[in-house]
Image (tube, rainbow, N blue to C red):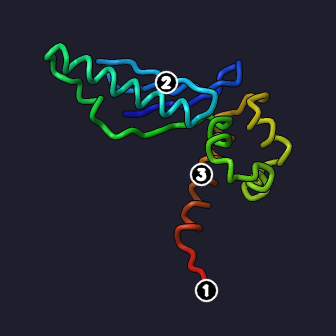
Amino acid sequence: MEVSIEKQSDGSYIAYNTTGDKVSIIGTGDTVKEAKEDFFNSVKEVRGDYVDRSETVPAELDESVDFRFDLSSLFEYYSIFNVSALGKYLGINPGLMRQYKKGDTPISDVQLSKIEDGIHRLGKELAALSLV
């Protein structure tokens, strides 16, 4: 099941499934962690409702979850990232990256793809390194 996590205009976070046609599930919280926990709690409650009614549980309630983040949510959840340093690594103006983090500036699909590709490249580099 694909689940989007996004920062809302009030500063809270929402997690909701974007796949599956049987159920819509939402989790909210003041942090990404809280929204994820609330989402999983909602899955548990909805699954329990199906079981209590002796109905077939929709397959998506038993699928693994693939989280998709907007940039604000990503940087809140993975606070280990220094947004300015990541911008330099990616070849994106650090000030612009900070604006993306705040959610103040719209981001194009091309720029979003550049950031995602760069984070994946960084992940591969980190996974391949060895310490001496």
Q: Is residue 61 left or right of residue 36?
A: left
Q: Is disc 1 placed on a helix, strand or loop? A: loop
Residue bearing the label numbered 3:
117
Q: Is residue 106 above or below residue 92?
A: above
Q: CA distance from mark 1 to mark 2?
A: 43 Å
Residue at (51, 37) in percent of width and height: 68
Q: CA distance from mark 2 to mark 3?
A: 28 Å
Chain-order first, disc 2 or disc 3: 2
Residue at (54, 64) in percent of width and height: 124
Residue bearing the label numbered 2:
27
Quadrant for the N terminus, please: top left
Quadrant for the C terminus, please: bottom right
The kind of residue tagged 2 is Gly
Residue at (75, 53) in percent of width and height: 82
Q: Is disc 3 placed on a helix, strand or loop? A: helix
Q: Residue 47 appears at what percent x and percent y?
A: 27, 24
The kind of residue tagged 3 is Asp
Chain-order first, disc 1 or disc 2: 2
